[in-house]
Structures are given as C-alpha cells and as structure tokens.
Amino acid sequence: MAVHGKRMTTDAGRPVGDNQNTLTAGPRGPVVFEDFLLFEKMAHFNRERIPERVVHAKGSGAYGHFVCTNPGIKDYTTAKLFATAGKRTDVFARFSTVGGEKGSADTERDPRGFAVKFYTDEGNWDMVGNNTPIFFIRDPLKFGDFIHTQKRDPRTNLKSPTMMWDFWSLSPESLHQVTILFSDRGTPDGYRHMNGYSSHTFSLINSRDELFYVKWHFKTLQGIKNLTRERADYIRGTDPDYAQRDLLEAIERGEFPKWRVYVQIMPEREAATYRINPFDLTKVWPHRDYPLVEAGEMTLNRNPQNYFAEVEQAAFEPRNIAPGMGFSPDKMLQARLVSYPDAHRYRLGVNYDALPVNKPYAAVHTYHRDGVMRFDGNAGAEPNYEPNSFGGPVEDPLYNERPRAISGTVARHDHREDSDYYSQPEALFRLMKPEDRERLIGNIVASMRTVPRRIQELQIQHFYKAAPAYGTGVAEGLGLKIEDIIAAEKAGVAAD
Ligand code: NDP
C-alpha cells in the first residue's frame, strides 16, 4: 500500500510497519518482550507530564509585538526598545489564574497572571505581573503560607474559605488586595478585557546614569469587562476553558487584542521622602502623585502551534531585565528574582532558557555547560572557562550595575511598623459605584458564610476601619450586628 504523507517512525527514526497490532506469541497473546514499539509508546506516555507550576498552573499564551509610541521614555532609560517611535519588539505573553491546578476553571475568583516576555535586542525583558496593581502580602517570608491558604486543606483536600479568611484576617496588609479580589475585577471576562501591572516597583536608568523608580501599567484597549459571580459560576460548569477559548478564537478571527503600555515614574531622590513607602507591594502610587506616562502599545496576533512546547514550557522570570533597567528594594521582588529561576530549574531542567519559546533573540555567550537535556550544541568547541586566551566571550563594563546607596542595619525589620492598612482600600471603596459595592459585599458574604464566627468578626473589623459602610454591609449580609463587633473590638474581646 502506498504511503501518503509522512512515514511514521520510532523515536530513533526507524520506519514503523504496524501501529495497530501488538507483537504477540500467537493471535491470542501473550505479548513478546521484543515489541520495542509498544514499550517505547507506553514508556513515553508514562512520562508526558512535567510538574505543574505551583502557582499560575492554568494559563494561555500568544505571540505579538510591542511598539514604542513615546521615544521620550529614553530620557529615563537607555533600554533600546524605547529608542525611537515605531521601534518594534516581539513578545510572548502568558495569562493565568493563580491558585487553581492545571485543569481548573478559568473563571475562578483569583488574581490573573499577566506575564510578557520582550525579545529585545539586548536580551529578554520579562514583565511578570498580575491584573492587580498590588498583592496580598509584602514580606516574601509569608508567600508559602499565603499560597497554602489558596490551595487545598491538608486533611479534606478541599478548598477552604476558612484557611483564606483566617490568614487574611490575621494579615491586615492583605485588605487592599482582598478588596480588589472580591470586586468585579476578581472575575475578569477572559484575558483580553483586563489590565496588567508590574505591581512591583522597578527602576530605569538613563544615559546620564540617573535612576527613576517605575511601575508598569498595561491598559486593555478592549475595555475592562468582568463577570458577575453568578455568571462566573455558571461558566465554570459549562465552559471551564473559557478564557483560553476566548483568547485563541479572537486571534484566529483576526481580532488582535491590544494594550497601551504606561509607566509611573518617580525620581530616585523622591523615594526617601514620599509619604508612601514606594517599595511596599500592598500599595499603589496614586495617579495624582505619579501620573501615567505612555510608552507604547502591545498587540497579540499569533497563537502558539503547540501548547505544551510554547505555553507550558514558557518560563518567565522577573530577573530578566534589559540594560537600562534595574530592580528596587521591594522585598517581594527581591525574593522573586531568586525564586522564579529556581522553580524553572525544578520544573523544566537547568537548560530551560534554551527552549525555543524562552531563547532570547540576542546571541547568548555564557560559560554554562552541560546539564540535563542540553540540546543546543553546548557551545561546541569554545573554551568553557574564563579568563582564557582562546577568544572566549569577555565582560563589558558598560553593562555593570549602577551603584546604589543603602542604609540601615541588617535585621528582621518589622514590616508591620507601617500600620496603614486602610487608606488605600478606603480610596478604592469610595471610587466604586453603589452597585459595585453591593456586588463586592455580596461576593465577600458568599465566600465567608461557612467561616468560623471569630474569623468573620475580625475580618469585619478590618472592613469597617476601611469604610463603615463596607464593614456594616458584610456584617448585615452574614446576619451579624456591627455594633456588637465594634464594641467587642474596643473591649478587646470576641463578640460571641
Ligand atoms: P484614581 O482615581 O486616580 O485612580 C483610580 C484607578 O482605579 C482607576 O484609574 C482605575 O485604574 C482603577 N479602578 C477603577 N475601578 C476599579 C475597581 N472597581 N477595582 C480596581 N481598580 C479600579 O485614584 P488613585 O490613583 O488615588 O487610586 C485610588 C484607588 O484605586 C487605589 O487605592 C487603588 O485601590 C485603585 N487603583 C489605583 C491604581 C494606581 O496605580 N494608582 C491602579 C489600579 C487601581 P486602571 O485604569 O489602572 O484600572
């Protein structure tokens, strides 16, 4: 029989004669050990899964580009992607939920990951943010504890509102992010209708060696669109891959999603005296203090050809910055600089950054060699040590880190010394329309219903301190008397 199309082979390239029938001793079996095709197929299948990401396991990705629309940004940075108006840089973006497993539903109430890899001329810049400008905690020592509350109860293997609200009520710095999470923005309508934020403060450095602290904002040009709790719950059951489908099909239809990219810019000297700690991840920089400056526009216009190769194996890491960019003292950021590559080495192996989706467009010349699954030629015959006298790559002091002044003592400084947990949640609550507030309170009440009374009361005290109507609304929804809760707090006892 003539073969049409590609001839099937084994992993070793040997053509396969029969992919329908196992090799057996006689028509009724048993199977003989020499059926290498059967054993190769089964062995490979047994190893198809790699560890899923411990957070952001469920995600969707697409390729596109960033175009600089404001070359004025080069007053703040030497990063070449902002050098001229119209300068185009290819990108790969991945969006995700955070707490759910790889097969979980896309419409869960959760922050959304918003990660963009810019393949710049001088190496990758990974903007690894969220659809929220802030986060639940501001000390990385608490990250694992916090994420455990978003996962499953160790005994029941069930999601546990008690674990979540217990942690949040005892971590009042989380109130700002909790307020965003339970607002409509906690259930965005797919990935195209949400903003992205670096959340962390980073820095830019210009040709005069001046440093500016910055926060990145990606504003959706599709407009913000969210799902109500009822609609999100319905879609969770009927179309759990809703956001993946929406992104994929929009791009296939030629409706390419776009975001306008902005940056808030704080000159270095202002950081020390600004009334808000600019490195506190639970706080925004109000727009009136640091207005958004346009930088460019991002468009996504190409779907990956293979989900596993390009989306599952994508590895984003905040340590990837272009020359002309820097970090900040934000403790959460500092921990992520180490934690992300560590996670990738565990999940994908030490050579993860040579995988096609992660590989920079810029030439890579390192002295790293070998390691599991080295598949890129391993730098051939080039010297594998430095210094050497055989023409190996050399350092260029032009790209050295700019010196930064530090002060203070090495100690476990108490981040709770800033006890302003309430002013920014208050500002957010105040800008919500009455119907937004009603849905916020309804979403919280639905989540807190089964939580022990003492935890409900402590959390209601936090809501009340942000805005009396906020605390009162939640208390009423849960059938509790706000006066008793406030009086009990003043007396230092539980209301029940
Ligand atoms: P502004 O009035 O200047 O900005 C308010 C911003 O809040 C809007 O521009 C919009 O930002 C965002 N927003 C509007 N509705 C909601 C909502 N329901 N949920 C979450 N965000 C919303 O005031 P400030 O800059 O003083 O900020 C006031 C509060 O707004 C902050 O405490 C913070 O909670 C929230 N916010 C502030 C941001 C900032 O960077 N300053 C960014 C996002 C939220 P956007 O267009 O980016 O969505």
Image: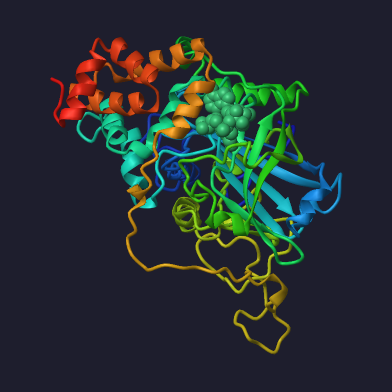
Question: In the figure, is residue 459 to the left or right of 436?
Answer: left
Q: How is the image coloured?
A: rainbow
Front residue of 483/155: it is: 483
Would you say residue 101 is visible in this rendering? no
Instruction: Give me the residue at 65% from left, 81% from top.
Output: 383
Quick check: 342 above or below 180?
Answer: below
Residue 189, image x and y in percent?
57, 19
Q: Which quadrant would residue 95 be assigned to in this image?
A: top right
Quick check: 130 above or below 279?
Answer: above
Instruction: Give me the residue at 48% from left, 57% from top.
Output: 334
- Pick the quarter of the image with the C terminus: top left
Quick check: 164 above or below 146?
Answer: above
Question: In the figure, is residue 10 to the left or right of 446?
Answer: right
Instruction: Give me the residue at 39% from left, 43% from top.
Output: 137
Residue 27, image x and y in percent?
42, 30
Would you say residue 406 is visible in this rendering? yes
Count of marks overlaid on the render: 0
Residue sticking out furthest to the bottom: 389
Quadrant assignment for ligand 1:
top right
Residue 268, image x and y in percent?
62, 58
Residue 165, image x and y in percent?
29, 29
Question: In the figure, is residue 149 to the left or right of 231?
Answer: left
Quick check: 312 above or below 371?
Answer: above
- Pick the quarter of the image with the N terminus: top right
Front residue of 228/252: it is: 228
Front residue of 318/314: it is: 318
